[in-house]
Image (tube, rainbow, N blue to C red):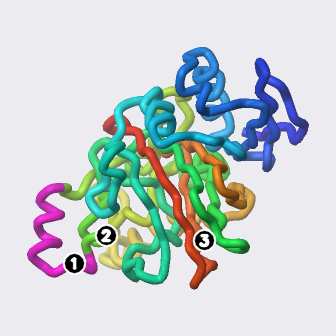
Amino acid sequence: MTVTAEPVTTGAIEVHPLTATIGAELRNVSLADASRDPELFARIKELLLRYKVVFLRDQDLTRAEHVTLAERFGPLEDHPMVGADPDHPGLVQIYKDLDSPAEQYENSFHCDATWREAPPMGAVLRCIETPDVGGDTIWVNMVEAYRRLPDHVKTQIADLRASHSIESTFGAALPAEQRRALRDRFPDAEHPVVRTHPETGEQTLFVNAFTTHFVNFHNAQRVRFGHDYSPGAGELLNYLIRQASVPEYQVRWRWTPNSVAIWDNRSTQHYAVQDYWPAVRKMERAGVIGDPTF
């Protein structure tokens, strides 16, 4: 999808596209009001489906309003590795400072929690505290990434499925017993490499940093000799994962306190740039439970 760079108005909302392919800043709208107003929320959701990620500044949301707004999209999920606000279940606290564990990095292109059988539908992320410089987040339009793949690659991956793992990512730094317990709780999930968006019908490239391997690559049509599978399958997967790093598919957002991003996790990836050490960055996220990909 290519969008106009000219601001438009829908209802009372001013919509300012940020790139030609993804992202828009919404102005003249209160998310606190949207948490209570179904019609206003519906307009915001329509814009989210169109632009994949929407941004708002100066949103004086309470934590209760943050949760209520996110719950309009659907029930909220917890996260097994990141702490949540005890008074507001589902509101995950992503606080980065000098005491943050080294393995809790965010600076990889990823789609949230694809290690779940039903990955999140999306999320509402609010900035609490941000560095004076640095700490931006990048989002990627994976519908556009799929659309612009060469035709022969689209044919090659049309029926492929891939495995996504929490054990080999969040679990890798844990002691073996804890890692295995995490794997037992969240077995590797299998998803199509090309996913059809359940609301828009768009096809999206659905591999990311949690993806470990194809599960149905090794057959007579694809593998003539051993190296067609290894390293051939891995090289293809790496090529697909690298599509998220193409700048033409991206938008980059500069955080300020009380700015908010709402993104569709089914059609995007994101990358939290960790270039602000030793400054502090504090974010709060409400993730929305999604649907199985089948």
* Residue 262 % position (x, y): 58, 42
Q: Residue at x 51, y 50 (%)?
A: 205
Answer whether residue 163 is magenta in the image. Answer: no
Tell me if residue 88 can be seen: yes
Q: Examine the image and state in which quarter residue 233 appears.
A: bottom left
Q: Residue at x 72, y 30 (%)?
A: 29
Identify residue type, mark 3: Val
Badge 2 element: helix
Residue 112 or residue 247, whichever sits in front = 112
* Residue 276 % position (x, y): 62, 78
**Which residue range is magenta in the image?**
172-185
Provide the residue designation for mark 3: 273
Q: Cα distance, mark 1 to mark 2?
A: 8 Å
For residue 62, above or below residue 223? above
**Residue 170, label in figure:** 2
Q: Cα distance, mark 3 to mark 1?
A: 24 Å
| Mark 1 Cα shell of 10 Å, populated few (<14), some (14-19), many (≥20) | some
